[in-house]
Each structure stands twice: as C-alpha cells, then as structure tokens.
Image (spheres, helix red, strand yellow):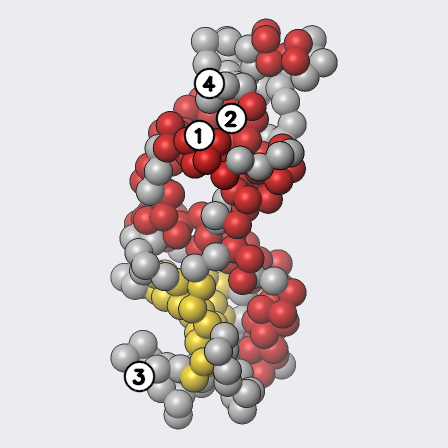
Amino acid sequence: MAIDYGEKERAFIGGLRENTGRDLAEWMAAISAADLPHRNDIIDWLRQQGFMFSKASWLERIHHNGGRPIYADSGKGRPRASVRRREGRTSGPPAPTEPPPVAEPRAIPAGGLNELLAKAKAYRPLAQYLIAQIRSVRPAARLSPSTTFITFADPKEFARLGIGAKELRLHLALGSHAVGDVVKKGVPGGGLGKDEALSHMIVLTDARQIDRRLLELVALAATNVNG
C-alpha cells in the first residue's frame, strides 16, 4: 500500500499546537526570527526545541517552501510540482519520511501512553525523543505509564520519567553516584527519596541534554538494578 504523505503531513501540522504549543504559522515565524544561515542550521535548531530529526527536517522543508505544506493540493502522496522542480525531482515522495513510532510494548494500551504524553504539552516531542533514546540503550525495557510518569523496567524498574508541562524529570537508580548541578539527589514526593532505589534525578527541558553522558547514566542505572 502506498504511503499517503499528504495525510501524514496534515496530521503532523494539525498536531503541532497540541504537541508543541505552537501552530504551523507560529513555527514559521519562529524559524524566520532565528535568522539562521543554512537549512541544516534550522534543522539543528528545531532539534534543540525537541523535534525528532525527520520532523525537524519536514518543518524546515515547509519553511523553505514559503511556509506552505509540501503536499497540499498535490494529490495523494506527491509533493507540489514546484517543490519537485526545486528539488530536482520529477516524481516520488521526498526524503525524509515520517519517523518510525516510538516503540511501545504490546502490553501497554497506546491510548494510555498518548494521554500521558499529552500532559507534557510543548515538551511532548522531548519526551518522545527521550523514550526512544532510552529504548536504544535498553531495547528490552518495558514501559508502564501511570497518571503522571512512565516507568522503565528490564525486568526490574531502573528509571522513571515524570511528565509535566513545565519540565520532565528523569529518575534513575544510580546508587552512590555523585550529585551536582545536573544529576541531583532524588526528592521525596516522587517515590524517589534518598533511601529508595531510584536515587537520582535529572531535570530536562532541552533536547541537547539528551547526550552520550545522559545515556551512559541510563545504562548504568539499568545495570545497577538488573545486571
């Protein structure tokens, strides 16, 4: 079955306000205001705002197209003719395509996870990106959403992601690991007091925080609990 890129684009654009706090026009204005010299710079900047690469690239292409959707009024799954000419194509969908969905175990109803992620509002793309990165470190990890957080277990819980509209809180089982400005001691009230397994916390508001060091801490937490 052919992929309907037009439908995917409409869904992407239609969900921008709910998922990021800005609609398409506001993102176009924000990109223009950033006044970045190259297309790759725009993509990098959008990734810093919490977008996955493919969606950042898609949004940049819409901006490069004068703020007009790539597939609008173009027929099923085909970009506008003007876009095809500008990109040196005569047919076929452009790259990049829609990213694969964040892996979710069969045991978790998608609606429960989606409802929880919706509470992150503008930080939803950041939460989705973090989930994907944690799963890349621990592919067998099982996700279990509650009303305010997601637990990660393999088979025992080693991490918990607290979802909020103002920030995300990643709680990890780091034992005697040092604390500092970034890696803080777990706080009471989140099930994360100093005497509990999930001993440390990292507050996340920017995709740039999800770097190699953070993923090393995730791997360490998983190993501390599960070996």
- Kindly report which numbered mark, 2 or 3, lies closer to the viewer in this rendering: 2
Q: Which residue is mark 1?
A: 28
Amino acid type, label 4 = Arg
Q: Please name whichever residue, 52 or 160, is drawn nearer the observer in this view of the structure.
A: 52
The 10 Å Cα crowd at callout 2, few under 14, some 14 to 19, many 20 or more, is many
Could you give the CA–CA distance between mark 3 and mark 1, rounded to whole angstroms? 41 Å
Q: Which mark is residue 146?
A: none
Residue in the image at 48% along x and 48% along y: 49
Amino acid type, label 1 = Met
Q: Are marks 3 and 1 in contact (CB under 8 Å)?
A: no
Give above or below for 84 relative to 135. Answer: above
Q: Which residue is mark 4?
A: 68
Q: Which residue is mark 3?
A: 188
Q: Are marks 1 and 4 in contact (CB under 8 Å)?
A: no
Q: Is residue 15 visible?
A: no
Query: Where is residue 111 drawn, in percent x and y?
Result: 33, 47
The answer to which image quadrant residue 148 occupies is bottom left
Amino acid type, label 2 = His
The 10 Å Cα crowd at callout 4, few under 14, some 14 to 19, many 20 or more, is some
Q: Are marks 2 and 4 in contact (CB under 8 Å)?
A: no
Q: Which residue is mark 2?
A: 63
- Kindly report which numbered mark, 1 or 4, lies closer to the viewer in this rendering: 1
Could you give the CA–CA distance between mark 4 and mark 3, rounded to whole angstroms? 48 Å
Could you give the CA–CA distance between mark 2 and mark 1, rounded to whole angstroms? 6 Å
